[in-house]
Image (spheres, rainbow, N blue to C red):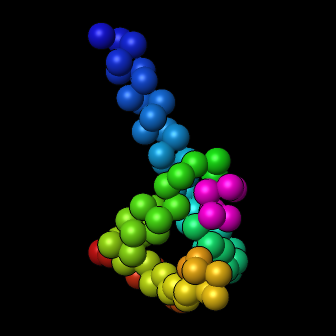
Amino acid sequence: MNIGKKATEAKNNTKNHIRATVRALFLSGRKLTAREINMITCSNDARKVISELRRSGWNITDLRLSSGCKLYWINSLPQQKD
């Protein structure tokens, strides 16, 4: 039983770390593709994290490049919810 619980906690910690890294990248003002975000975070969750950030109020803009990739950046800082 404990092994399953530890595995779940490790998975959640990894997801939280990826989310925090993506938030920090956008807050730094960088414009990145999902591929670049995935390379930086060593994951394959960039588009999922971007969707989650948008649902939580982040104004993330995207632009399709001629290569077919989308370039993402933060348009304005997220609003604090009371």
Where is residue 17 shown, x and y percent of the image?
55, 47
State the quadrant of the C terminus: bottom left
Position of 51 with respect to 24 (left or right) is: left
Which quadrant holds residue 38? bottom right
Main secondary-structure element of the magenta-colored stretch: helix
Position of 8 with respect to 36 (left or right) is: left
Image height of 30 relative to 75, above or below: above
Q: Name the residue nearer the viewer: 12 or 70.
A: 70
Which quadrant holds residue 49? bottom left
Name the outermost residue toward the front. 67
Q: Please state the extent of the stretch shown in magenta in the rendering.
A: 35-40
Q: Name the residue nearer the viewer: 53 or 33.
A: 33
State the quadrant of the N terminus: top left
Q: Is residue 18 magenta?
A: no
Is residue 72 in view from this perspective? Answer: no
Is residue 13 in view from this perspective? Answer: yes
Q: Is residue 39 magenta?
A: yes
Where is residue 73 shown, x and y percent of the image?
59, 81
